[in-house]
Image: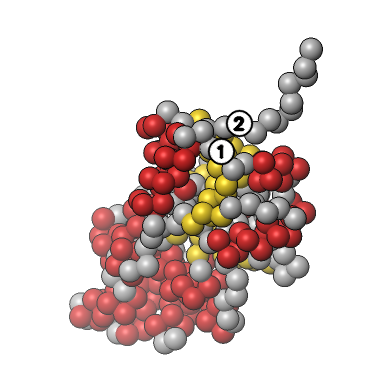
Amino acid sequence: MAIEEKNKTEKSTLYLVATPIGNLADLSDRAKKVLSEVDFVAAEDTRNSAKLLMLLGIRKELVSYHEHNKKQSGERLIARLLAGESCALITDAGMPAISDPGEDIVKLCADAGIRVTVVPGACAAVSALSLSALSTSRFAFEGFLPAVKGERKKRLSAVSGDDRTLIFYEAPHKLRATLVDMCDAFGGERRISLCRELTKINEEIMRTTLAEASRYYEVNEPRGEYVLIVEGSSGEVISDEVAALNSLSPEEHIEKYIAEGMTKMDAIKRAARDRGMTKSELYKIINS
């Protein structure tokens, strides 16, 4: 009697294959097996994925699937899966379909009755959370914040009262602005763990406060992709008046108190208290 093959790669199946976030040795044997046996591989960036497959000694057809072509490419992928082919979906690093256009192809497969399974592995969000020294019992993944400042501030304001640990992704060129906006929304004393270059030679974990992190990156250049793990709200109720003031820019906040008759120094002191930071921290922000 034939013995059923363990981890057999099935036809008409989409495999979500996690790839290393920095260290190639983190790729599992099962992931290598699936990548070598599927009919084709769908990738966010075919150039990066071609390098990965080359390092693994795997020659496989690569199909482009990313945010800007997901509609047309998704339709073609579904047609091939329905015709009996198997496909491995990978992203540049980590788990596909998490803060990634892969979520759309999973929905399309579910609607079409196509089997989807996962080959688990590295995930930057969970890896950073485990290293953060913040609460891991309850957390919320926020992914990338909006690039437009007004939308970013609105999103941060919406989660400012959440008592779960918050997880964000951020690019180096946006980090400084994001930290300033987080100080405004959450208060400078809120704790944060900044994780960069995870599993790589230059891996760095900075555990500090939002105000300290903002101050540090005023004089140090952000490098590498970041995962930001932010402490949840302590549960203190913020009055509607203070919440409205904190939605203003630091300069507008101070000017409002000056218009009410305060001296500039008193206005800075009062605005800093509203925002949960020291007077000197706020003074540095408005003079940066």
The quadrant holding residue 271 is bottom left
Considering depth in this image, is 274 or 227 the residue closer to the camera? Answer: 227
* Residue 207 can be seen, yes or no: no
Position of the C terminus by quadrant: bottom left
- Vertical placement of 283 versus 23: above or below? below
Position of the N terminus by quadrant: top right
Considering depth in this image, is 31 or 3 the residue closer to the camera? Answer: 3
Q: Amino acid at mark 2?
A: Glu
Image x and y of residue 63, in percent: 51, 54
Residue at 57% over, 49% down: 41
Residue at 77% over, 17% down: 2
Reading the image, the residue beneath label 2 is: 10
| Distance of label 1 from label 2 (alpha carbons) | 7 Å
**Is the residue under label 2 in contact with that under label 1 (CB below 8 Å)?**
yes
The quadrant holding residue 124 is bottom right
Image x and y of residue 57, in percent: 75, 55
Q: Which mark is residue 86?
A: 1
Q: Residues within 10 Å of mark 2 (few under 14, many from 20)?
A: some
Residue at 52% over, 81% down: 218
* Residue 177 can be seen, yes or no: yes
Considering depth in this image, is 75 or 207 the residue closer to the camera? Answer: 75
Considering depth in this image, is 277 or 233 the residue closer to the camera? Answer: 233
Image x and y of residue 259, in percent: 20, 80
Report the side of 286 relative to 61 (left or right): left
